[in-house]
């Protein structure tokens, strides 16, 4: 009993600092909108309504959470090895492009085959991009944060080039895109709702990532590299292989997000893929303290913040960048709160003592 | 094309002109980042600072009618962001790279939010000095329209180099960047030194941003900067933390950025996006060529986490 209570207390304590950081960010954001002449209470109310206020907004939120889970994994997995990777956007874009190209090329083949090939193509593209970042880090000591961001810009340029050039659908005039996917190859909604199967895919990937990192020898070795690379090398761990495999898996997750976006939301690849899921995913991973399981609820929270953006725009005339400002505030406050981590003690740990001593 | 057209000769000329025209933001951001990194900290948030500087400069220039006031305001906005970065990094257990990413997001978000009303109007621009009066060709003349800010940046680099080498301030900064322990033992306040270095770096990055909106491209919109800030941060590593090398590296990157528009102006429209990605490809290639997994980079401040 005491052990369960202690575990519960530990969980609550772990939630206190990020929770307080969120509340503080909410207050700061409120002060910010008050400065530009908008009633903060109205903003809070609309944000809640747009994110979680109705079944409709819940569905919108969950649809946005699906890619966020996957892009967050792109940062959270390498973080176990001590790497800071922010190239999820690039992997998503490239994954979406590869999936769309595959789906169009295989038009007419059996559905299961095409869907599988699209998923694999998306994952392979993302894995090549972020795995490349890991390989560069290991082989040449290239800083992974900078290289992953540079590769994101390059990936977006490649996507723009392809959808306006070799892969352009001549019928897409205003918004250059690849040819649309056939209806049969699109990911459908979950039974009874408008949320697509990508959400399930995301949750499964997050759970698999958690199992890999905390329940397998591979994950143990990876976390050991993250804790002390020199010690890991001395212990004979294959640091390079761990690095490259983990970054490739991370990229595959974000690439899969691109495939899901193409097959479930847009139906084709175009510039709409560059929607900021990558940068938000970085924030989700940090707020989840790089824990793959914690990524799921945090991604839903940020899916909600994204979903409420439209309502803020329509009702209060706030710019669409309000969501970005709020996210930026959360990120900054969260990092500042790291300094408080481990200092807060909500409960004195229940001492395991003889009954007599307890009464005294 | 009009009379006096140079045809394909326009491409190297445009690249040269671009080297002068586009390099200015690279130059200012890299000089600022150089200063910050010398103190042993990296500020990746300069991408956000650049955008924020561009927006602030445009808004203030539009409001006041004086572009130089805009430049100053951009610098001050950058200073505020630099100070914010440094004060959060000064807390325990806070990673400077992560704070940089956060400020990238916040800076961009704030600039887009506050800059919404300034997308349409035209703000007064910074003056340019003509060095091409001797030439009969319009293209040569326009290529040699050099902005005053570029000249300021050029003058700043040797000044910074001299200051780092020969002044007491520069010495303290380098000690803090090389060994925080030693600096602490000598009685210097490490966080204060880094705060100053990061705030000054932010000032320069903000000024670099003002160039984007007040000279080239010369208007404010949300696509103004895409990665110039982060490219400039990488450029400092390439320039081995030497302000003079930052000048040459900036010129190189400016030239690479001009490649896409230059080719487009002579009718090469194929691969426009790919040519526009040239500076990123160049940055990455240089990083790969000059980094090493085995030994530290020559000239790297020992306290800098990014090169470990």
Image (spheres, rainbow, N blue to C red):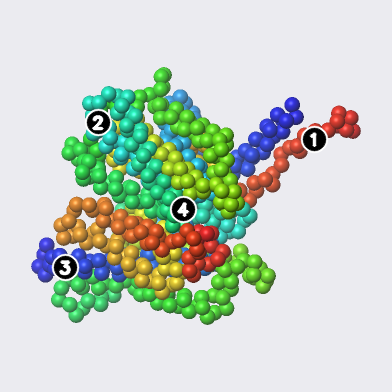
- Residue that label 2 marks: A106
Name which of mark 4 and mark 2 comes first in the sequence: 2
C-alpha distance separating marks 1 and 2: 64 Å
User: Comparing marks 1 and 4, which lies closer to the viewer?
Assistant: 4
Residue A179 location, quadrant? top left
The residue marked by circle 2 belongs to what chain?
Answer: A
Based on the displayed image, in which of its 4 quarters is residue A277 positioned? top left
Mark 1 or 2 closer to N-term? 2
What is the distance, in whole Å, between disc 1 and disc 4 at their CAs?
46 Å
Q: Is residue B134 visible?
A: yes
Residue B203 at x, y percent in the picture: 47, 65
Marks 1 and 2 close (CB-CB < 8 Å): no
Residue A314, visible in the rendered structure: no
Say which residue label 4 marks.
A138
* Cβ–Cβ under 8 Å for marks 4 and 3: no
Say which element carries label 4: helix
Report the Cα–Cα distance between label 4 and label 2: 36 Å
In the image: residue A38, left or right of residue A127:
right
Residue hosting label 3: B9
Q: Chain of mark 3?
A: B
């Amino acid at each position: 009993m005491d052990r369960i209570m202690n575990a519960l207390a530990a969980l609550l304590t772990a939630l206190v600092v990020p929770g307080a950081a969120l509340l503080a960010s909410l207050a700061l954001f409120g002060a910010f909108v008050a400065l530009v002449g908008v009633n903060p209470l109205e903003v809070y109310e609309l944000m809640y309504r747009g994110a979680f206020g109705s079944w409709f907004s819940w569905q919108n939120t969950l649809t946005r959470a699906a890619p966020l889970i996957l892009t967050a994994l792109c940062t959270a997995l390498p973080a176990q090895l001590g790497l800071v990777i922010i190239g999820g956007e690039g992997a998503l874009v490239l994954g979406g492009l590869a999936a769309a190209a595959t789906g169009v090329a295989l038009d007419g083949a059996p559905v299961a085959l095409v869907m599988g090939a699209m998923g694999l193509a998306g994952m392979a593209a993302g894995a090549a991009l972020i795995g490349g970042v890991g390989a560069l880090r290991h082989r040449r000591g290239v800083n992974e944060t900078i290289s992953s961001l540079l590769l994101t810009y390059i990936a977006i340029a490649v996507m723009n080039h392809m959808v306006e050039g070799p892969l352009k659908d001549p019928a897409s005039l205003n918004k250059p895109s690849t040819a649309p996917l056939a209806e049969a190859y699109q990911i459908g909604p979950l039974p009874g709702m408008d949320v697509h199967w990508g959400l399930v895919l995301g949750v499964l990937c997050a759970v698999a990532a958690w199992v890999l990192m905390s329940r397998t020898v591979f994950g143990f070795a990876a976390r050991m590299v993250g804790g002390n690379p020199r010690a890991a090398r001395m212990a004979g761990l294959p640091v390079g292989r761990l690095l490259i495999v983990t970054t490739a898996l991370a990229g595959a997750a974000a690439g899969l997000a691109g495939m899901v976006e193409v097959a479930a939301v847009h139906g084709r690849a175009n510039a709409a893929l560059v929607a900021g899921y990558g940068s938000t995913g970085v924030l989700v991973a940090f707020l989840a303290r790089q824990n793959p399981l914690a990524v799921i609820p945090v991604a839903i929270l940020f899916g909600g913040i994204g979903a409420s953006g439209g309502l803020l725009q329509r009702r209060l005339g706030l710019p669409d960048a309000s969501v970005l400002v709020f996210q930026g505030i959360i990120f900054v406050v969260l990092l500042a709160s790291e300094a408080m981590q481990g200092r807060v003690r909500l409960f004195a740990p229940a001492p395991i003592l003889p009954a007599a001593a307890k009464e005294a | 094309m009009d009379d006096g057209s140079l045809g394909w000769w326009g491409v190297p000329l445009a690249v040269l002109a671009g080297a002068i025209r586009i390099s200015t933001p690279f130059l200012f951001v890299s000089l600022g980042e150089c200063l910050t990194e010398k103190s042993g900290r990296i500020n990746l948030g300069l991408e956000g600072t650049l955008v924020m500087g561009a927006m602030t400069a445009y808004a203030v220039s539009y409001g006041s009618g004086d572009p130089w006031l805009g430049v100053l305001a951009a610098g001050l906005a950058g200073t505020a962001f630099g100070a914010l970065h440094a004060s959060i990094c000064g807390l325990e257990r806070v990673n400077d790279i992560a704070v940089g990413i956060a400020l990238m997001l916040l800076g961009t978000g704030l600039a887009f939010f506050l800059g919404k009303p300034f997308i349409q109007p035209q703000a007064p621009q910074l003056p340019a000095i003509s060095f091409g009066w001797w030439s009969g060709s319009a293209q040569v003349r326009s290529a040699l329209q050099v902005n005053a800010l570029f000249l300021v940046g050029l003058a700043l680099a040797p000044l910074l180099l001299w200051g780092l080498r020969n002044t007491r301030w520069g010495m303290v900064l380098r000690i803090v960047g090389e060994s925080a322990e030693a600096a602490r033992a000598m009685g210097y306040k490490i966080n204060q030194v880094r705060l100053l270095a990061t705030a000054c770096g932010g000032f320069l990055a903000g000024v670099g941003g003002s160039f984007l909106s007040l000279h080239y491209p010369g208007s404010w919109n949300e696509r103004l900067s895409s990665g110039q800030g982060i490219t400039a941060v990488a450029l400092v590593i390439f320039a081995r933390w030497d302000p003079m090398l930052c000048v040459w590296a900036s010129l190189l990157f400016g030239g690479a950025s001009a490649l896409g528009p230059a080719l487009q102006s002579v009718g090469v429209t194929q691969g426009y996006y790919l040519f526009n990605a040239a500076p990123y490809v160049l940055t990455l290639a240089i990083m790969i060529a000059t980094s090493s997994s085995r030994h530290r980079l020559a000239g790297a401040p020992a306290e800098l986490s990014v090169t470990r």
